[in-house]
Amino acid sequence: MKKRWNIILLLILAFALVWPYVGPDYQVYLSLSLFSYSIALLGFNLLLKYVGLLSFGHALFIGLGGYTTAFLTSEFHIPHMEFSIILSILICAIVATTVGFICVRYVKIYFAMLTLAFGMLFHSVLMKTYHLTGGDEGMALERPYLLGIDFSSMGTIEFFSGPFYYYNLGILIIATIIMWRIVHSPFGLCLQSIRDNPDKAKSLGIGIRKYRLYAFIISGCFTGVGGALMATATGHMDPGMVFWVHSADLVFMTLVGGFTNFFGPMLGSLIFIYLRDIITSFTEYWRFIFGALLAVIVILCPGGAMEALTNFFKLLVGKTKPGEKI
Amino acid sequence: MIIEAQNIKKYYGGFCALDDVSIGINEGEFASIIGPNGAGKTTLINILTGFLKPEAGRVLYKEENIVGMGPEKLTKLGITRTFQLSAIFSELSVLDAIKIAVISRQGKGMRFFADLARDKQVHEQALEVAELFEFTDQMQEKAINLPQGKKKLIDVASAFALHPEIILLDEPTSGVSTSDKHHIMQVLVEASKKIGINTVVQVEHDMDIVFSYSKRVIAIQQGKILADGTSDEIKKNEYVVSAAIGRKESFTTFRDIMAAKGQQGA
Amino acid sequence: MIETVFNILFSGIFYASILFLVAAGLQLVFGVQKIFNMACGSFYALGAYLGIFFVNSFLSMGGTPLLALLPLLAAGFVLAIIGPIIERGLLKFVYDRDEHFQLLLTFAIIFMLEDVIRLFWGTSPQLTVGVYMAFGKINVLGATIPVYNLIVIAAALVIAGIMGHIITHTRFGAIIRAAASNNEMAQAVGLNINNIYVKVFTIGTVLGTIGGALVIPTTAAMSEMALDLVVLAFAVVVIGGLGSMKGAFAGALLVGILKSLTITIYPELEMLLIYLIVIIVLIFKPEGLFGTAT
């Protein structure tokens, strides 16, 4: 089973590497969203799948990452993307420590509500600080240097389907490997014990709040990096990216893809981004279709697309086995 | 005395669950706490293991007052417990549940990047405990798929894997059929010896089990200590035993069974 | 100075009245079905849009603005039909599920209803003209208060009174309270829980749609209404306490007056202050002012 997954992943990676050369420009550009949302979702799902905490305010970290990058590139004229990423991580870590310290004392719906409130608090701050952040008009981002190289001579399409695409993909691969290691570490197992039975975990010596807080901080940092890349791809950052509906979009993507699988949310963002694109090309009522899709998933297949797919493959495998025996 | 409760008072709102309870457990003892449902046995365990704070009284562990210290801290000091209602990690396998205890004991809980699958130390120690509790064939099974008795055993096994100095078991054999209870107890006793857990306190309803394995019996009724003595003393106390079982008539049946056992030399 | 105070107070109580209606619906559904209905804002928006349609039709058929309250309330009641549709069609499948999934289903409903509104009314703001003015203003204790606001406040009080009476003095109210405190027990004693769920959800829906309809003369119906309202309603029930009617009342009053206060004195603060208070309440008294701790 593991080997099959490894092969599938390698195939997907190979495809991703050649995609800019075979895919239409617009679709390639959409992939940037896919990559940055995937990174953001790695953070989000750490909390949901492994700690059992549903955050309705994770767009807060997208905002922190995005606005940090906006400030660095446009206001302070520090164009290095690496600098933006590192500073985004630092700022997200600091904010996550404060917000997390308060939020991890609560579970379930109270945690969801608190995170929503913090997200919206940041939203209102952004809306009201016109002089600093451009209020509801937002801020523009300048094109960054990648690995110290100045690409300003390149055309927009060239840059975003070329250097930035591979840069973004590279960060996604690194982020995925790091998160994979985290969830398969002793720390990751302890997180899951807290998710399944906090009292039992306590009785085994696990400090609930400490572990949840650390997970929250790690989660926030990953989502912040996603935000930094998202903002760079669109060249713009506005409070809408922090509005609670954007946080809910993250939840949506995760559920649709399947939150019980490590790669589920990534599949979910793929579905969300590309499906929305396809649907909007023939109807403006994509929200209705997506709402219906989410409703169907919640009611019929809570494990999301990933669960549906694995069941489908199991069905295929099950069908061929008796055939082979005969 | 390794652990001592002094004048514990515990209230749930207006209801007095424990009324001036004092008991002391000596190192190396195997004690049973008996009493009818609602007597306050689990409340006492909760207080001794840091899950609840009493309104009054102290709990001394090795001469130190541990009231107010949470279960996490107490685990590090060597006090562990199991739960009355299956306390399992539903999505985790048997081996994983035990691994968590080992990770906690080895202080590896904060290792973010270490590959758990490759950690031989953790794996071997968890394996050892799993085998002691007869989980050899079920190690990769998700806890939620196992029968009730096995679920309880995972709770016990993982607690044992912490190598505590004293363990408090809340009805370790409930959910297990009567014929299996003795087997579980034997596994438990063997495991304590192998791992080196000296002091065991259990809450138990089955009088046969109580008197077969424990040397000390403490009876609680309506939040007060009814009796506290050796199992030989308590065994003969009609009032205490019938209070624990719940019906006076049962005592005569019980007495006859124990007498018959005595004659068989069981 | 004192006029400003009264102005702030009355417009605050006006906001509070509308918020109370929506929050009461939320609390009712949460109390009985234990679901936080995020789509309450969408019901509010539907009430607003349909309210405009009914009022404008009414006016164009020669109706007098002073009776505009009738088409508005009618719009609210007509929309009651979506209650059973959503409850039986979608919600009933997730009652036994994890509360995260329940929340998400209501979020899915928001998405769908957003496009339903878009389908019928497009994206540009809708309004009804002249109704608000037709009622005029009166002088109360030195402040000039629009009469319409007073009517809405009165309507909200009447509805609150009726609800209070139903809940405490009627058999149906007793049934609701029983189902809210222990629905397994309620089923065990023979109550038809499904029946109760549909009725409660429909009442909750209507409270939301009426709230939206009543606010119409004072503001335009816009596509963001639904989403903006959810966060306000959320603030109200958190502050007041999830599941509590008294909480809906108190929370609505607090949020309404705060909103009015900040808009008048320090507009920059508006939502910021409300969220800060939500966070403070969640930290120090998570069950809210009147809620019962879970």
Image (spheres, coloured by chain):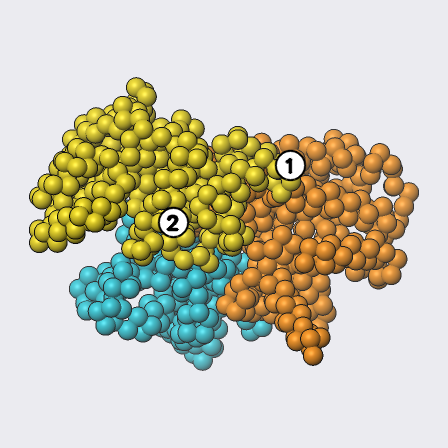
The residue closer to the viewer here, A64 or B129, is: B129
Tell me the yellow chain: B
Instruction: Assign a secondary structure to mark 1.
Output: loop
Are there few (<14), some (14-19), or many (20+) residues within 10 Å of tag 2? Answer: many
Pinpoint residue B169: horizontal percent, then vertical percent.
Answer: 32, 41
The residue closer to the viewer here, B91 or A210, is: B91
Q: Is residue B172 visible?
A: yes
The residue under the point 19% across, 67% down is: C170
Residue C208 to residue A240: above or below: below
Residue A150 to residue A20: above or below: above
Q: Amino acid at mark 2?
A: Lys
Chain of the residue that carries numbered disc 2 in the rendered image: B
In the image, farthest residue toward the right? A153
Q: Is residue A171 left or right of residue C219?
A: right
Tell me the orange chain: A
The residue under the point 39% across, 36% down is: B192
Instruction: Assign a secondary structure to mark 2.
Output: helix
Query: Is label 2 on the same chain as label 1?
Result: yes
What distance separates the C-alpha of mark 2 from that of mark 1? 32 Å
Tell me the cyan chain: C
The residue under the point 83% across, 36% down is: A147
Pinpoint residue A134: horizontal percent, then vertical percent.
Answer: 65, 41
The residue closer to the viewer here, B195 or A1, is: B195
Which mark is on residue B152?
2
Chain of the residue that carries numbered disc 1 in the rendered image: B
User: Which sits earlier in the primary sequence, circle 2 or circle 1?
Assistant: 1
**Quadrant position of residue A285:** bottom right
Q: Amino acid at mark 1?
A: Phe
Q: State the count of labels.
A: 2
**Quadrant position of residue A70:** top right
Residue identifier under label 1: B113
